Amino acid sequence: MSSPDEILVSEQILQVPFCYSAGPVASKFLLALKDEKKIYGIWCPTCNQVYVPPRATCGACSAELKDWVPLSGQGKVESFTVVRYTETTQPLPAPYVIAVIKLEGADTGFTHLLGEVDEKKLKIGLKVEPVFARERKGHILDIRYFKPL
């Protein structure tokens, strides 16, 4: 018989298939990645902020956002971490690097993978550019990763 302080652990695999609608704003962003290999931000005329990834309303003033801004895709690393463990839900086997990148012309950071980078050369301010997947599907991983310039 179990003691009242014993913790039981049961491993299970739960699969829940579902469809997700990205909505009109995120769909336009993802389709531009897929069809144009282009990154767009969205601009708030009230706050003069450019959001990447784009959103339907401004986080500062709640204005409806409609004005799209094409970006070069180049930017600078604002922060990063090296992931050293592997889980089935992760996009890559460990080790890999995730960074917050502030794209030129944007006011918000964009979290994505870094590739083609020597861990010893990782630093805040590292200039990067996107590397697009050969076959794109309208997914955020249509940008395979950002690499150093």
Image (cartoon, helix red, strand yellow):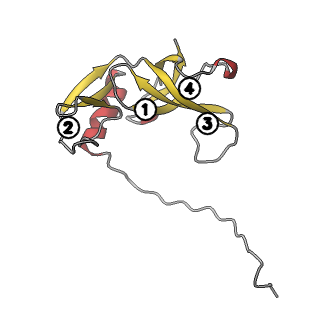
The residue type indicated by label 1 comes to: Phe
* Residue at 35% over, 34% down: 53
Residue on which the image places disc 4: 114
Farthest-out residue, top = 149
Which element is circle 2 on? loop
The residue type indicated by label 3 comes to: Leu
Among numbered discs 1 and 2, the one appearing first in the sequence: 2
Residue on which the image places disc 3: 92
**CA distance for labels 4 and 3:** 11 Å
Residue on which the image places disc 1: 110
In the depicted structure, whether residue 62 falls above or below residue 45 = below
Among numbered discs 2 and 4, the one appearing first in the sequence: 2
Which element is circle 1 on? strand
Q: Quadrant of residue 41?
A: top left
The residue nearer to you, when weighing 121 against 141, is 121
Nearest to viewer (mark 4 / mark 1)? 1
Q: Position of residue 122 (x, y in %)?
A: 62, 21
